[in-house]
Image (cartoon, rainbow, N blue to C red):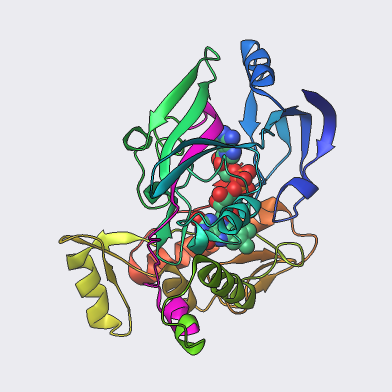
Amino acid sequence: MIIENHKDLREHNSFGVSAKCSTFVTLESEEDIEVYLHSPSEHFVLGGGSNVLFTQDVQGTIVNVALDHIEEVKRTEDHVWLTVGAGMNWHNFVMHCIAQGYGGLENLSLIPGTVGASPIQNIGAYGVEIMDLISEVVAYRVSDAKPQTFSNGACEFSYRDSIFKNRLKGQYLISHVTFKLTTNHHQINTSYEPLAKAIAEQNVANPSIKQISDAVIQIRQSKLPDPAVLGNAGSFFKNPIISTEQASLIKSEYPALKSYPVDDDYVKLPAAWLIDQCGWKGTRRGDAGVHEKHALVLVNYGRATGLEIYELSEEILQSVVSKFGIRLEREVNVI
Ligand SMILES: Cc1cc2nc3c(=O)[nH]c(=O)nc-3n(C[C@H](O)[C@H](O)[C@H](O)COP(=O)(O)OP(=O)(O)OC[C@H]3O[C@@H](n4cnc5c(N)ncnc54)[C@H](O)[C@@H]3O)c2cc1C
């Protein structure tokens, strides 16, 4: 266990905003987790910091789970089960799987962050959500330091949500995630239009998982700002899910609005379009801004504070409510 005092978190969040914490604890083993949880302080668990916005200094402790091993726990003719430490870098894990010929994660290449955070908001991109590949999650209950295994069903996954972000928020510390991946007969998913287009342009009839991953990386690099260059946390807001009835009403006034069916009664709307219609793309307030190509991505041009970025997000929320009657939800965890 490593304990550091009065640490600046600027290097530990992809917005690159400054915030101090009293204590930063790095847990390097299961034993460390148990020892720490036997007398825990008021804390916040931080992975790679790519889905958080610090709006002020953290009075308590920041806890980082640094376990980063990969263990094969089961294998059948077509599948392999890998148990991975929460602190493992997500993209490095995806690259490891592709190098081994394990399929499933290729569409989720280049998402910043750690393996331990992947179930929290059920990360997803390019037509795939991690809920389709997680077999179980091991998490320690903060109140009594007991490890508990959550089956996929027990994680209560839904769009950018899980039991850990919702009902049990802050009550568990994830130590491991087990993934079920394919070793043969990979389920190649090109349902996301720009990905299908990129693959078609390469004239590849049956793309490999490596080709899919390469295409995803290329699209992401061309579209999304690199946090190392321009501080951001990816999509700041979730795409809202509203009733088909409400969507029809809005569409009657804004025929260009696209919607994607969730079930018979609900549709998902692109939050980026709603924000863009309110004229936010490229807006800048000091060093806090809305990305010039992406209305959904709030950015730190240098020395913005977390509070300034938060206040900008609040203005965006209000304008979308006024124009469309829809209250967007933040995807980013505000602290
Ligand atoms: C450029 C960019 C692009 C992105 N693209 C996508 C995308 O395509 N799809 C997508 O879904 N997300 C995307 N994100 C968001 C982000 O990458 C994911 O949410 C990622 O899973 C966050 O991982 P992290 O380790 O940085 O988590 P953090 O930001 O550190 O934490 C996120 C939440 O998880 C909790 N947490 C983290 N680790 C643990 C643990 N071990 N135990 C308990 N709780 C924990 C934290 O308390 C916090 O509530 C993007 C972000 C950026 C910056």
Residue 82's place in the image compared with 201, above or below, is: above
- The reply to whether the magenta stretch includes residue 176 is yes
Horizontally, is 131 left or right of 248 in the view?
right
Residue 243: x %, y % from top left: 22, 61
105 or 142, nearer to the observer: 105
Residue at 32 percent of width and 77 percent of height = 258
Residue 83's place in the image compared with 23, above or below, is: below
Residue 31: x %, y % from top left: 67, 17
Identify the image quadrant of residue 264: bottom left
- The reply to whether the magenta stretch includes residue 156 is no
Residue at 70 percent of width and 67 percent of height = 226
Q: Residue furthest front?
A: 77
Residue at 61 percent of width and 58 percent of height = 99
Residue 186: x %, y % from top left: 40, 61
Q: Quadrant of the C terminus?
A: top right
Q: Quadrant of the N terminus?
A: top right
- Residue interval drawn in magenta: 169-198
Horizontally, is 214 left or right of 204 in the view?
right
222 or 275, nearer to the observer: 222
Residue 8's place in the image compared with 17, above or below, is: above
- Is residue 43 visible in the rendered image? The answer is yes
Residue 110: x %, y % from top left: 61, 61
Horizontally, is 1 left or right of 129 in the view?
right
Identify the image quadrant of residue 257: bottom left
